[in-house]
Amino acid sequence: MKLFGIPFSPWTEKARWALDHHRLAYTFHEHGPLLGEWRLRRRMRQPTGPVTVPVLEADRWYRDSFEIARYAEGLGHGPRLFPEGQLDALTAWNARSEAALAAGRALFMLGALDTPGGLAALVPPEVPAPLRPLVRPVVRRSLEALTLKYRMRDDTGRHEQLLTQTLDALATAVSPERPYLLGAFSYADIAMALVLQGVSPVDTSFMPVGIGGRAAWTQPRLAARYPALLQWRDALYAKHRRPPAA
Ligand SMILES: N[C@@H](CCC(=O)N[C@@H](CS)C(=O)NCC(=O)O)C(=O)O
């Protein structure tokens, strides 16, 4: 099997965690946004319609992290991530996770576009100083294309509120005594743990921090408001995240 994804993307990490949990063999192929999309479309024979990563090439193409995790569950060797009889609750947590991840991504990208100096931080560090001002418009255009693709300006101003509501719901559902959303470790915990990647990234031994580094990926107000959730996420990783496949 081949997994195409972005190493620092929470959506990719959701799929990888499920595949690794079930000890499935796959190769990981790094996807570059925009240009990479064109290459992936050719490979998938999908010239039109939305394409996002992760996607898994197996007996057919699996085009969404949740779908990939369910496929892994059917093949897998680890304890179940989709417990019997709880699919509705699990699907609801995943929907919350998706909405909150989209809000987090919008906060990150609109912040970079609308804050003075925000774009400069996203120019890759290996670009030499004299070239950096030339690269900034390219970064701007890429971010603007993504804000249009995901309609981020439709909800400007509501992103932080949505993220906060989701984190409040998570904070009432888990505690050190009750660490699992559905009573035992499941995909619901994975989906919600990844929402915290845009609040304060997990240790880089588990997954890399994205462009802009830790500072760009941290929301200081939210990180200060939810320290217990960050501890919950870190404990979950320490206990349940198997090392990724190559
Ligand atoms: N519902 C999808 C969402 C995936 C998604 O939004 N992927 C983003 C990750 S940043 C992506 O593909 N971005 C690159 C692009 O749009 O070109 C899933 O769970 O797999």
Image (tube, rainbow, N blue to C red):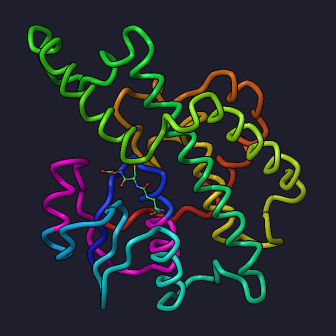
User: Residue, x 65% and y 34% (percent of image)?
Assistant: 158
| Residues rendered magenta in the picture | 15-41
Q: Is residue 72 left or right of residue 194?
A: left
Is 37 contained in the magenta span? yes
Furthest toward the front, the residue is 154
Q: Is residue 9 magenta?
A: no
Q: Nearer the viewer, residue 15 or 135?
A: 135
Q: In this image, 174 relative to 112: left or right?
A: right
Q: Residue 164: where, in percent of width, then height?
A: 74, 37
Which residue occupies the foreground of this view, 27 or 54? Answer: 54
Of residues 236 and 107, which is closer to you in this image? 107
Question: Quarter holding the N terminus?
Answer: bottom left
How many callouts does the rendering have? Answer: 0
Q: Point out the quarter of the image occupied by ligand 1.
A: bottom left
Left or right for 95, reference 126: right
Image quadrant assignment for residue 58: bottom left
Query: Residue 75 placed where, x, y %?
Result: 47, 91
Q: Position of residue 116 (x, y in %)?
A: 40, 8
